[in-house]
Structures are given as C-alpha cells and as structure tokens.
Image (cartoon, grey):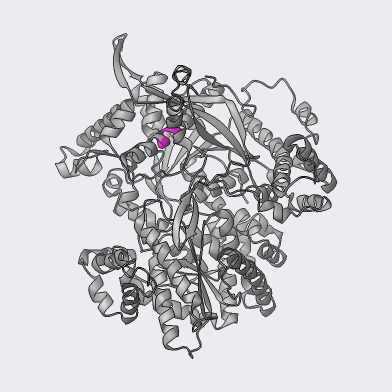
C-alpha cells in the first residue's frame, strides 16, 4: 500500500526545475492565470477534448459529450492555478486549514468554474460557433449527490470562500457512489431511488491511486512492555482501504485553487479467489460488498442496528483517512509532529467527525510514540468544532458496546480522556456529586451506556462555535451548559454565510448585472458594496428594472413547474417559497395548515379581493422519517384539491417540486417573493436559505430563530415579517404541558383546518391518512404549530397587504438585497481565520 505524494504535493526541496521552465511547459505558457482566453482557441480546446478524451466526432456528439469536453477544457485552466497554489503553499510554509465534513453539497461545477475564471462568455461564444447551446449543455451535468441540506451546502460555500480568500485548505469527506437518494413523488408520496450521479463519469475529479490508507475495525488491543513502558497494540480483524479522489476548488478570479479530497472505500482483497473457484461466486465478493458499502450512500437509515453500525463505520472511515493523510503531509514537509498545531487547523463540521479526537490521539501516541500529555496538547490546539444543532436526537451518541467492538483502541482512549477530565475537575473544584459528574462525563449512563460525541468534540477542541448569535447563546445555556461553566472561553459565535459568487452571480445573472450597473463592478468583489443601491430603493425607474428581472425569473420558474408538475401558475402572483429539508421543527406543517385555512377562507368569501399567491414547497424527508414523509403527502394532497378547484383558480396554487437539490434551488431562489423561515424558535441553528433568498430580494416571513434575528437587524425591522413565540417563550410553553387543546379550541381557523383533515377532505380515499399528524398536534405539539398558528395567519395577511402596494414592496425587496452583504461566507471565513485557525486571509 503506497502513501506517496500526488503530483500536487511536491517535496519541500524539490525545486530543481525553475518556475519559468514550469510555466513555459504548459499549454498557454503559464499565461492563463492572467491573460484573456480567446474564444477561438477555447473552441479548439473543446474540440480536442471531444475528439481525444471523449472519443466522439462533433457530428455524433450529444449534449453530455459537449459538457464533458467543455469541463475538461476548463479543467486545464484550473490545473495551472491549482499547481501554482500548491507550490506557493509549500514554498511559503503556510498553515493549512482542513475542513472535515460528512457532506459537501457542491452542486454543478461547470458554471462555477467558468464564472470564477471569467470564462463564461468565452465558453458561450466558443460553443455557439460549434452550434452548441451552453445553457442546454449545462443541464446535462448531474448534481454531485454529496450532501443533504444546509450542513453540506455550508461546507461547499466555505470551500469556495477559502479559495477566494487564498487560504490554503483541504476539504475532506466521502466520495459517495450514490449519495443522498433521488426523490420521486408518486401519488403524492416520496419514494427514494439511487442518485447515480457518477454514471456518466466525473470530469472534475482526479483519482489518486497512489494515495491509499488502511482503515481498521474490530479486533483487540494487546498490552506490550517495551523498555519499562506499556504500549497498546491494536490488532484489528478487518481492514478497509480508503482511496483518494481530488476535485479542485477554484476561487474567485482564479487567483487560488484548493483541494476537495474525497475517500472511496475499497476491499483490501478485491476477490477471494479460492472461494470463487469453489463455485461460491457471491460469497467470494461478500467481503468486498461489506467494505464498499461504506462509501455507497449518504446517511444510510439508522432504524436498524446494522444501519447504525454502517454510519459509525462511515464517520471513522473518512476521519481516519483524512488524519492519516494530513499527518503524512506534515511529516513529509516538516519532519516532526511537534509543529502540527502551528501548521494545521482542523475544523470538525458537526459531530460526524468527532471521533477525530480519539483517532488523532491514537496516531500521535500509538503510531508516532508521542507522550500522552504532548499528544493531547497538540490535539486540542489543532482541532476545533462547529455545532449545528440543539436537538438532543441530533447530537450523536454511540453505544459503548458498539464502539468497544468496532473501535476497541478508541474506546480505551475515550475512557482515559474522560478519566483525566474528571480527575482534573476534582482537583480544581473538590469532590463532585454524582449529578455534576454525569452532566460533564463523556459517557451517558442513564440507560444504555453511550458515548456523547458532542462532549468528546468539545473537550478535544480549543474552540467550539455556534453558527448564529442565538444558537451560540443557547448552546451555552442548554446542551453545553455544564461544560461551558468549566471552560467559559471555549464557545464562540461564527454566524454562517453564503458565497455570493454562487447565489447571486451564477444563480441570478440578471440581478447581478443590474446591481453592477447601478452600484459599480465593485459589488463583484466586495459584498458590502451592495449598500450603494440603498438610495435607489425609492427610485421608480430602478424599481421597475428590479421588478422586471424578478418577473423574468418567475416566468422561468413557472415554465419549470408546468413541465414537472403540469400545473399552471401565474408569474404575476406572489411566489411564497419554503425550500428546505422536511422536518417537523422547520414547520412545513404550519405552512400547509395556513394554506388550508386560506383555501377555506377563499371558498367562504369568493368575492373578496384576495391577493393571488403560489405556495411553492421543495425538500426531502429522511427515508425512515415517517411523519415527515406524511407531511409531503399532505402537501401534495392539498395541492391536488386546491389546484383543481375552480372557485380559487387564479388566487391560490400549490406546488411541491420533487428532488430538491442545488440546481433546483438556483431556479427557485431568484423567483421567490416571500421566504418562509418559520422554524420553532430556538431549534434552527442558523439557516442559510434565509440568506440566499434575502440576497435575491425575497422578503422573509419568519420567527426570531437562528440567523433570522441577525437578518432582521441588518435589513431593518420594517423590511421583514416576524411573528410567533420567542425561544424563551417556546421553553415556557413547553413546561405548560398539554397546551394544544385549549389553543385549538380558541383558534377557529386552525380548528376548521384540522377538522377538514380529520374528515378526509384532502384524502377521501383514506380519511384517517393524516391522523398521526392530528394526534401529534392535539396531544403534544412539541414544535408549537398550534401556538404560533394565529400569529402566522395574521403575518401572512400583513404580507398580502404589503404585496398590494408594489412601490412599497419593491422598496423593501431592494433594501433586503442592499443590506445583506454581511452574510457573505467570506466574512464568516475571515472570522474563523482570525479567531480560531490563526491564518491570514485576503482582504476585500
């Protein structure tokens, strides 16, 4: 098994060839980093790739062939900068950031690469000369199925910002063969199919067959005495290989390129030949299937013990491979691990890679012979941890028995970390009572003994951050209350951000061009320059142009809805959008109940002047999340009834768009008028969809939750619609117990909506279909749907009133775009770099 350098990782002193000679050896003499590319030469490059890499004649080439050829031609320009960036990092001995994430929701990469390299117009002209439409070609690129929602999209935004700010960085994750499932909706119900995103190949990635690491599982730990010291030798029973695939991540203006390194699982022995020759052809491949299952799908169902074990294997697999890789790279360049923390910063994106604390200690102590105290100091100075949730069920814990069986050495290390931690507390504060010990212990002893991975990540990191001001404050008061009391300086806030290159420049070029014309080209490099359009918010001519670009986006989305759902919607109506993972705390159910109430109100008063509205939903429910899948069915059943009713035609339509992904988001967000951010207060860590929609001019209707609070502060209270209970009020209502029956009884519209569900109005074929949702709302209502319903209804009617005044609406819309610049992921990365990682960044 070879663990050698890749072409992008030269040895520190391998400088025999001069930089001038290196540049001269490249296709463009190295000038690609600075010179404008001629469309004719780019056309020739595409043709060469089509012929010699794809093996197709132009006359026989299909759209996907043209996509692959174009991507390969673009990739050549990326490689120049990739190699330059890597060489510079080595030569300057710069500190690297390593971003560990189980998800990277990168979406399509062609337009991102073309835009960041300023090659979009060049490529469009070059392909047009060949009779090929770039926009049609773009549609053949699959979305990389490497993420689920905000966690993965945040990781993708951060990787792009790291490159744009010229911070040397690696992203580490898993190269899923199928990733998250492809969602289809049949008879209103979600069905999960494999998302075969690699079926046509991936022109962006580079396989690194020489970069392979052993990942071990099971077995036992031997204690061996050497020179009076007891050494622990892990004797595993299973070894899986992690093989590297690299994707370059190009930053804005092409000034710097980083690496996204994803790991694919391989069996150490691809075929048990003796078993095969005995005629057991399936059995000969069983071990291979078990090994490769690790990188098959994202988030396998954990409803079974086998599913839980597979998820733990996934998390350890990519974490161990990544740590082995960066330790090898550091030793190769510096020769000693004593400087690891000075030259490496590892960010753990949620608890999925929290096993890194124990694995890095194992590597340092067992594999490289460092004393425990030194290894712990290096580990805690190198690692930092981002928490993304306050929901107890989402804070990972693993059964002690499972960890002892799969990772016996790591369980020993966790026990020792815990023992030293508790001993240190006893020395500082004296004997602790059982309750105090239980609160801060890494082991939860309440029922089945389980390891608290959030606690492990907290103890093993020098900084722990929340992702919005409210979330961070609640972390200090709830999930990490006792640990925060012991380490009061460890928790810091880093409010999330989004990359404007993707969510404005690429997703909404009409708006980008309008803003650049009005405020100057500086907006392309400095999001804060958007403030220059504030004075134009009341300018009638600018409002008309702003509204015109929105109308064009809405017409495009209306066509997409018609194509996919056979539902006709009016682009002049208010487009009311809720696009996110389907979860009870995100409260799609609240939105649907208000839709039912609005439908009933229109039916009751058909002559009233109702503002036309299109309710647009999109999102996936976890495969094993029955109640979330029932919410999807309800949305589709309501859509069927509402859309077929002639009494409300032209005033209310409902559309649930299947298979929500980055590309679909790029179609919906520029067309959204109203952004639904209505999670139960205190439960949404931050949200980033709220930022993308506000950037594109949508008005937010939402609770004071997550980053909504900071958006409200930035765009102004008059330019956002806030309703509902606050986080402390949610907590107080929760202590009341069964509040829902009284609330429903005193809320006629809500009672009528629930009664229609109970009577089977939307499910005549199965009247009891939605009984589980009704029972949850009437007996528990953990997510305060009933408590917030009336306030939400009134807030929506206020939206109707605002929509009836176009001048006032467009003024608010423009101000949202103008004032949202602070939510750039560039700002977030600068804060991480300065406060947590200790690395310099490029300033705007």
The reply, left or right, for residue 443 in relation to residue 181 is left
> 433 or 55, which is in the foreground?
55
Q: Is residue 97 above or below residue 484?
A: above
Residue 362 is one of the magenta-drawn residues: no
Q: Is residue 81 visible?
A: yes
Q: Position of residue 60 (x, y in %)?
A: 78, 45
Q: Position of residue 141 (x, y in %)?
A: 64, 48
Magenta span: helix, strand or loop, mainly?
helix
> 705 or 672, which is in the foreground?
672
Find the magenta span and give its range. 314-318
Q: Is residue 760 above or below residue 341?
A: below
The structure residue drawn at horizontal position 42% and vertical position 77%, both measured from the top left corner, is 795
Residue 315 is one of the magenta-drawn residues: yes
Q: Is residue 704 visible?
A: no
The reply, left or right, for residue 757 in relation to residue 186 is left
> 526 or 184, which is in the foreground?
184
Q: Position of residue 244 (x, y in %)?
A: 55, 31
Q: Residue furthest top?
A: 227
């Amino acid at each position: 098994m070879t663990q050698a350098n890749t072409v992008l990782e030269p040895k520190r002193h391998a400088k025999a060839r001069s930089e001038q000679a290196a540049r001269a050896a490249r296709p463009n003499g190295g000038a690609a980093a600075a010179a404008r590319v001629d469309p004719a030469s780019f056309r020739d490059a595409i043709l060469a790739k089509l012929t010699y890499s794809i093996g197709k004649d132009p006359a026989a080439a299909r759209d996907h062939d043209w996509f692959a050829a174009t991507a390969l031609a673009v990739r050549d320009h990326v490689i120049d900068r990739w190699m330059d960036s890597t060489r510079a990092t080595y030569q300057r001995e710069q500190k690297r950031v390593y971003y560990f994430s189980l998800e990277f929701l990168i979406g399509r990469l062609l337009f991102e690469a073309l835009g960041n390299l300023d090659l979009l117009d060049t490529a469009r002209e070059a392909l047009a000369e060949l009779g090929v439409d770039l926009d049609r070609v773009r549609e053949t690129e699959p979305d990389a199925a490497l993420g689920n929602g905000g966690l993965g999209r945040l990781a993708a935004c951060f990787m792009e910002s790291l490159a744009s700010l010229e911070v040397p960085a690696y992203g580490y994750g898993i190269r899923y063969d199928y990733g998250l499932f492809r969602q289809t909706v049949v008879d209103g119900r979600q069905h999960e199919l494999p998302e075969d995103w690699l079926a046509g190949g991936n022109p962006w990635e580079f396989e690194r067959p020489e970069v392979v690491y052993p990942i071990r599982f099971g077995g036992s730990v031997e204690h061996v005495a050497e020179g009076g010291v007891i050494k622990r030798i892990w004797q595993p029973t299973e070894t899986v290989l992690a093989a590297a695939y690299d994707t370059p991540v190009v930053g804005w203006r092409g000034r710097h390129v980083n690496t996204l390194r994803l790991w694919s699982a391989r069996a150490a022995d691809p075929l048990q030949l003796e078993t095969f020759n005995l005629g057991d052809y399936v059995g000969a491949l069983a071990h291979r299937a078990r090994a490769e299952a690790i990188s098959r799908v994202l988030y396998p169902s954990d409803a079974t013990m086998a599913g839980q074990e597979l998820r733990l294997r996934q998390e350890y697999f990519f974490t161990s491979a990544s740590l082995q890789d960066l330790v090898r790279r550091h030793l190769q360049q510096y020769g000693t691990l004593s400087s690891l923390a000075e030259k490496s910063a590892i960010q753990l994106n949620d608890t999925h890679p929290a096993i890194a604390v124990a694995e890095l200690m194992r590597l340092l102590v067992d594999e490289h012979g460092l004393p425990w105290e030194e290894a712990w100091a290096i580990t805690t100075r190198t690692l930092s941890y981002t928490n993304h949730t306050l929901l107890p069920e989402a804070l990972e814990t693993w059964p002690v028995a499972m960890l002892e069986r799969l990772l016996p050495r790591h369980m020993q290390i966790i026990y020792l970390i815990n023992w030293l931690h508790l001993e240190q507390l006893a020395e500082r504060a004296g004997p602790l009572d059982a309750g105090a010990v239980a609160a801060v212990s890494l082991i939860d002893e309440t029922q089945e003994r389980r390891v608290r991975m959030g606690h492990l990540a907290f103890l093993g990191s020098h900084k722990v951050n929340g992702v919005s001001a409210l979330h961070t404050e609640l972390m200090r008061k709830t999930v990490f209350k006792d640990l925060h009391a012991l380490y009061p300086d460890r928790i810091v806030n880093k409010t999330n951000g989004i990359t404007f290159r993707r969510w404005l420049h690429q997703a909404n070029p009409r708006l980008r061009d309008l803003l650049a014309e009005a405020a100057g080209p500086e907006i392309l490099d400095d999001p804060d320059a958007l403030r220059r359009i504030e004075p134009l918010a009341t300018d009638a001519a600018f409002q008309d142009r702003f509204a015109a670009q929105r109308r064009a986006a809405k017409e495009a989305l209306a066509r997409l809805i018609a194509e996919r759902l056979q539902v006709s919607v009016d682009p002049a109506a208010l487009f009311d959008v809720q696009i996110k993972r389907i979860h009870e705390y995100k409260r799609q159910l609240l939105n649907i109940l208000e839709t039912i109430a609005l439908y009933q109100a229109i039916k009751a008063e058909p002559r009233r002047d109702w503002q036309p509205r299109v309710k647009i939903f999109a999102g996936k429910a976890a495969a094993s999340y029955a109640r979330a899948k029932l919410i999807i069915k309800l949305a589709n059943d309501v859509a069927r009834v509402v859309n077929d009713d002639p009494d409300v035609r032209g005033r209310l339509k409902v559309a649930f768009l299947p298979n929500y992904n980055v590309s679909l988001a790029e179609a919906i967000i520029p067309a959204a008028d109203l952004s639904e951010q209505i999670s139960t207060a205190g439960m949404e860590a931050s949200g980033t969809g709220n930022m993308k929609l506000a950037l594109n001019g949508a008005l937010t209707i939402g609770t004071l939750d997550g980053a909504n609070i900071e958006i409200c502060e930035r765009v102004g209270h008059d330019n956002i619609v806030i309703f509902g209970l606050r986080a402390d009020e949610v907590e107080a209502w929760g202590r009341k117990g069964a509040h829902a029956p009284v609330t429903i009884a005193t809320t006629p519209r809500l009672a009528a909506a629930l009664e229609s569900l109970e009577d089977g109005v939307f499910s005549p074929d199965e009247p009891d279909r939605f009984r589980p949702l009704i029972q949850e709302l009437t007996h528990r209502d953990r997510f305060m749907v009933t408590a917030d319903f009336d306030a939400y209804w009134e807030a929506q009617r206020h939206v109707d009133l605002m929509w009836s005044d176009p001048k006032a609406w467009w003024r608010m819309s423009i101000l949202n775009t103008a004032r949202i610049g602070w939510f750039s992921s560039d700002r977030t990365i600068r804060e991480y770099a300065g406060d947590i990682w200790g690395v310099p960044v490029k300033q705007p």
